[in-house]
Amino acid sequence: MTGVSDFVVITGMSGAGRSQAGNCLEDLGWFVIDNLPPELIPKVADLAIGSRDQEPKLALAVGAGHGVDDIQSSIAALRRTGARVRVIFLDSSTEVLVRRYESTKRRHPLLQHEGLGDAIERERDVLRSVRESADLVIDTSSLSVHELKQRIVELFSDPNLGDVMQTTVMSFGFKHGVPGDVDIVLDCRFLPNPYWNEELRPLSGLDRPIVEFLDAVPETAEFLDRLEHLLELLVPAYRAEGKSYLTIALGCTGGHHRSVAMAGGLRPCLARRGVAPGVTHRDVPKGGRRLCRRPPSSRSVVGTGWRRRCVRCVRWPTR
């Protein structure tokens, strides 16, 4: 049974970005353990390698608050497992680290009775041998959080995993409230509402008749075309900013017809830009159609196929 075969040990100066690097690796699909005592590294490795629930990649963030000898011996033990092991050392100038600690108001782990700058220099001396033996040293003195993330993505992203930025297209109804966890909100209420057509009313934008109804409206194609060109600008810019998630919400009155159909129409637009989005319809029940609330004995069903509905409910079709 094969377990974890790829390890990354993230170490370095306190305040140089260990946690940010770990968060970025987690976004790339790595299993990350932060602030792990070095003496536990071999035990975690043994458990991971022998696990039936295989995690292909494991990242371990180790701070300088633990003995440097423990760090070195634990890394050596990890290498003896035969797994691929890479050690990243994150460094930064003392001046920059002092500014970061002063801005966050956090206490340096090695600070005792000396000044902050002296504690940082003492940590630098303690970790000198770890730095010299690291596989990769990244100086974050002049890097923003986004630039550090981009550097980690360049080093560790798997091209087979596709887009690092997870994109979601969501439909919703304004009468049920605008979703709060979205980045872009688009209003589809300028399109004619299929709700006012009695035959189309029971359907959702997942049904072909709704799509055909909206495709017959010239504004539909123009809307999707202009939106595609807008996203051609925005998607690369969001990626460059280091954004991990992008959610695009399209709304109509009830969230059943226009927004659902436009969300489906947006998917191929994004695909042409190299994005494979997930599509979710917040206000459409599972299966795409609303069910009759009456018991079967009291239903009066007419029609066939997509026109099948209970005439007592009108808007609550049956299956």
Image (cartoon, rainbow, N blue to C red):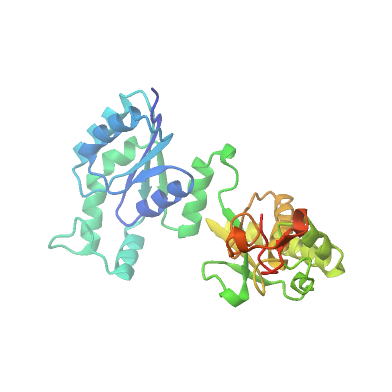
Above or below 6: residue 109: below
| Residue 127 vertical position relative to residue 309 in the rendered view, above or below | above
Q: Is residue 130 left or right of residue 139?
A: left
Work out whether residue 228 or residue 128 is closer to the camera in this orientation and state it. 228
Describe residue 235's horizontal placement relative to residue 306 as left or right: left
Q: Does 214 sit left or right of 6 as displayed? A: right
- Looking at the rendered image, the quarter that the C terminus falls into is bottom right
Residue 5 vertical position relative to residue 209 in the rendered view, above or below: above
Q: Position of residue 107 (x, y in %)?
A: 23, 63
Q: Residue at x 23, y 40 (%)?
A: 38
Count up the numbered dots: 0
- Residue 242 seen by the camera: no
Q: Residue furthest left?
A: 113
- Tell me if 289 is positioned left or right of 125 in this view: right
| Residue toward you, 300 or 165 | 300
Residue in the image at 56% along x and 53% along y: 166
Q: Is residue 43 visible?
A: yes
Image quadrant in which the N terminus is located: top left
> Residue 224's x, y, as percent?
77, 63
Residue at 74 percent across and 55 percent down: it is: 269
Counting from the top left corner in percent of width and height, residue 43 is at 24, 33
Camera-nearest residue between 155 and 286 = 286
For the residue pair 186 and 173, the one nearer the viewer reads as 173
Q: Quadrant of residue 250?
A: bottom right
Q: Position of residue 214 (x, y in %)?
A: 81, 65
